[in-house]
Image: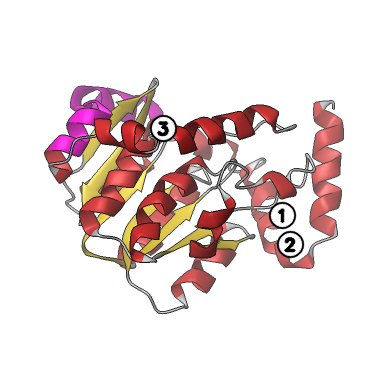
Amino acid sequence: MSEIARVFKTFIGYLKRPDLYPELGRKILKNTVNRNNAFKGKAKTHSWASSKAVSQKEAISQLFSLDSSLFRKDFEEILIQSLNKEKECPIKMGGPGALELIYFACEFTKAQNVVETGVAYGWSSLASLLSLKKRNGILYSSDMPYLGQNGDQYVGYVVPEDLKRNWKLFRFADKESLPKIFGEGKKFDVVHYDSDKSYNGRVWAYHELYSNLRKGGVFISDDIGDNSAYQDFCETNRIETTVVEFEGKFVGVFIK
């Protein structure tokens, strides 16, 4: 499918969903007048993140005093099955992120309630759910419909069926999903951000997520090197953060 055809199909998909009109307006602004917003402060933050970065293994040991190698051993069979599911999926979405970091954040906090933004194949969802299942906790996920690639039915594709009873999936943009999730009155043990990459989108979501994270909870954000939103958020709020370098990208994590 050509880029023009994909954009047209996405636009038609939005028109068929009045509940997504607010996000359509934001998308138009983001790709026109705010086009450079996605990269605001990128050079500054790349230098900052590079100077602080540690490995995922080091971060888990330093923050949680846990052994990250246990994750791959304990869940080897499930991870192989999920990888095979990804390979058979007819559309391409984001691959696995820092799964151990997410899983051990949930273990460290003995999580009962976790919120994430961005699902795609469901790798990060899987990491959270493997921990939450032990305590019958709930994962609340925000994920936009894949309007341009007929991909809705494949969101969360790698998550085994038996874990889905601990999962609530909200199929809207973050600005619609997060108020619905936080409206349930929970305080969250872990929050994980991996959706809107723009500077403004991140700053808005970071504030909402942080406000609903309990003291002692864990805050995780993927791809913090895209712009300076995460660095600016931490500096404004005097947060001492750990930076994880993972597969050429940077992940931010701290305990509130």
Task: Estimate the spatial distance between the alpha carbons at disc 1 and disc 2, rounded to whole Å.
Answer: 5 Å
Q: Who is closer to the viewer here, 69 or 244?
A: 69
Quadrant location, the C terminus: bottom left
Q: Amino acid at mark 2?
A: Tyr
Q: Is residue 75 above or below residue 54?
A: below
In x, y percent, where is residue 167? 52, 61
Residue, x 78% and y 66% (percent of image)? 18
Which label number is shown at residue 24?
A: 1
Using the image as rendered, state which of residue 152 and residue 7 is in the foreground. 152
Q: Amino acid at mark 3?
A: Glu
Q: Residue 149 or 109: which is nearer the viewer?
A: 109
In magenta stretch: residue 70: no
Magenta part of the chain: 42-61
157 relative to 132 in the view: left or right: right
Q: Is residue 77 left or right of residue 12?
A: left
Q: Is residue 46 magenta?
A: yes
- Using the numbered discs, state the Cα–Cα distance from disc 3 to disc 2 in whole angstroms: 42 Å
Give the x, y percent position of residue 50. Answer: 26, 22
| Prevailing SS of the magenta stretch | helix
Disc with the residue nearer the chain's start (3 vs 2): 2
Element at badge 1? helix
Q: Which amino acid type is shown beneath numbered disc 1? A: Leu
**Residue 164 in the image, given as x and y percentages of width and height:** 55, 58
Q: Earlier in the sequence, mark 3 or mark 1?
A: 1
Q: Is residue 172 above or below residue 250?
A: below
Whole-angstrom CA distance, mark 3 to mark 1, is 41 Å
Q: Is residue 103 visible?
A: yes
Residue at (66%, 57%) from the top-left corner? 23
Residue 21 tag number: 2
